[in-house]
Image (tube, helix red, strand yellow):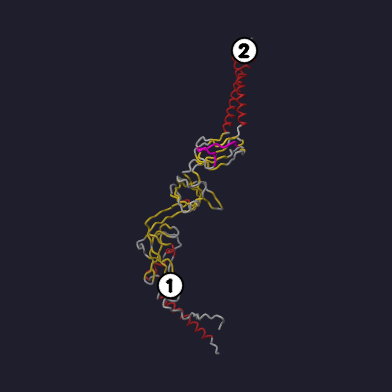
């Protein structure tokens, strides 16, 4: 077999490439090889939110502690007659618990006896001083004795005052053995059991946590420093909890705490969200997924963000707009202006728009040319080389499909 020369092979390859280019150009001109993905401009609502997580907290919690040491003797009763426990509803002054008061009762008895002794001594000193005053310093009463009676009377009065103070202190400690609720509310935590010894030192040991009103709750939300500038008092907030999937609770921003925290170089601020809990569904310390409503625009024109990112090649743009397309703003550049593209015959043309808020998927737009239901280009689709009539690329090897025989290779 005669070999083809190197020049002949080059010529054949070149002709093949030219044929492919001509074939693709013809099909591209007929619109068979490429088409555009489009979407309609819609009018609707656009809600911009900031997402963050937080914890449901009672609006006001009172920590009830013990001011004396001792063994928990018994628990009091709630308004229904049940022993104080988690969830008990209590009134102001309700007895929550009792500490064994044996030692404190003895202290009261001792202080009482000491006061009685001091009173008796004061009475005697007062009588002696009265007699000394009648005699006065004279031959019958030496001046030193006179001064001694006066001093004894003054000391007796001081001892009475000291004994009375000691008795008052003993009574107060005795009263501290009875732990009473300082407020009306609900017990959300009981931290002691009967028989447990509480030790009062520099810090009073915590026995109970009482929420004053569970009908009003707060959500403490950690907001990133990049978003805190968009948060303000009275701002509406929607949040959900895993305990009630699908149900949306509503609240508003009550306070922004200024004591920021830093975790792994990320600065966050705690935002207090106030919410109504008249239904009683929200429990303390549930995890909440909150969304702060930054803006809520109704009846605005919306376009997909993909339409704002897409830009055509210069050859695809209608000739009269090609200069303008070369100056079109970059979709990645932050700007108040943007461009969307629509088909014009076999070409595309730009429409300038003013950009509004975006939720990451859709963006609000305004402009004289942009209209509702207008079809705008969001991308370009490449179709298969074969058209609907079965035309195929003559330079692509064709696979022959035979029968079911596959036992060997021929």
Foreground residue among 157 and 94: 94
Disc 2 target residue: 137
From the image, which quarter does the N terminus lie in? bottom right
Of all residues, the one furthest to the front in this rendering is 81
174 inside magenta stretch: no
Is disc 2 in contact with disc 1, using a CB cutoff of under 8 Å?
Answer: no
From the image, which quarter does the C terminus lie in? bottom right
User: Where's residue 311, x and y in %?
Assistant: 43, 67
In the rendered structure, which segment of residues is drawn in magenta?
A: 72-85
Q: Is residue 125 above or below residue 38?
A: above
User: Where's residue 201, x and y in %?
Assistant: 61, 37
Kindly indicate the quadrant of the structure image that contains residue 110.
top right
Query: Majority secondary structure of the magenta segment?
Result: loop
Secondary-structure class at tag 1: strand
Foreground residue among 2 and 180: 180
User: Mark 2 or mark 1: which is in front?
Assistant: 1
Q: Is residue 34 above or below residue 123?
A: below
Q: Residues within 10 Å of mark 2 (few under 14, many from 20)?
A: some
Residue 337 disc label: none
* Upstream in sequence: badge 2 or badge 1: 1
Q: Is residue 5 above or below residue 349?
A: below
């Amino acid at each position: 077999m005669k070999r083809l020369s190197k020049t002949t092979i080059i010529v054949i390859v070149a002709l093949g490439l030219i044929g492919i280019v001509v074939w693709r150009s013809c099909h591209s001109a007929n619109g068979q090889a490429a088409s555009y993905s489009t979407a309609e401009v819609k009018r609707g609502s656009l809600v911009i939110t900031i997402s963050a997580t937080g914890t449901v907290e009672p609006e006001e919690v009172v920590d009830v502690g013990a001011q004396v040491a001792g063994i928990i003797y018994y628990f009091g009763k709630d308004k229904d007659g049940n022993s104080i426990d988690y969830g008990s509803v209590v009134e102001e002054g309700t007895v929550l618990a009792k500490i064994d008061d044996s030692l404190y009762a003895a202290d009261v008895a001792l202080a009482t006896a000491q006061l009685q002794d001091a009173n008796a001594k004061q009475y005697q000193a007062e009588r002696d001083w009265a007699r000394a005053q009648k005699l006065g310093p004279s031959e019958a009463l030496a001046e030193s004795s006179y001064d001694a009676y006066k001093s004894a009377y003054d000391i007796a009065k001081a001892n009475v005052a000291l004994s009375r103070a000691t008795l008052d202190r003993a009574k107060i400690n005795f009263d501290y053995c009875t732990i009473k609720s300082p407020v009306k509310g609900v017990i959300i935590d009981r931290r002691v059991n009967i028989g447990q010894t509480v030790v009062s030192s520099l810090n009073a040991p915590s026995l109970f946590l009482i929420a004053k009103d569970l009908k009003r709750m707060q959500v403490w939300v950690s907001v990133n420093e990049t978003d805190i500038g968009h948060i303000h008092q009275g701002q509406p907030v929607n949040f959900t909890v895993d305990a009630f999937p699908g149900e949306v609770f509503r609240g508003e921003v009550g306070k922004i705490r200024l004591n920021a925290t830093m975790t792994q170089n990320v600065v966050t601020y705690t935002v207090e969200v106030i919410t109504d809990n008249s239904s009683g569904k929200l429990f303390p310390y549930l995890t909440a997924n909150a969304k702060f409503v930054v803006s809520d625009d109704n009846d605005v024109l919306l376009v997909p963000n993909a339409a704002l990112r897409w830009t055509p090649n210069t050859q695809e743009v209608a000739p009269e707009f090609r200069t303008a397309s070369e100056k079109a703003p970059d979709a990645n550049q932050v700007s108040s202006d943007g461009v969307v593209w629509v088909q014009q015959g076999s070409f595309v043309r730009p429409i300038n728009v003013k950009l509004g808020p975006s939720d990451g998927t859709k963006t609000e737009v305004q402009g004289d040319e942009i209209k509702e239901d207008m079809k705008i280009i969001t991308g370009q689709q490449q179709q298969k080389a074969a058209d609907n009539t079965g035309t195929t690329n003559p330079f692509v090897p064709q696979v022959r499909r035979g029968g079911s025989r596959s036992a060997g290779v021929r």
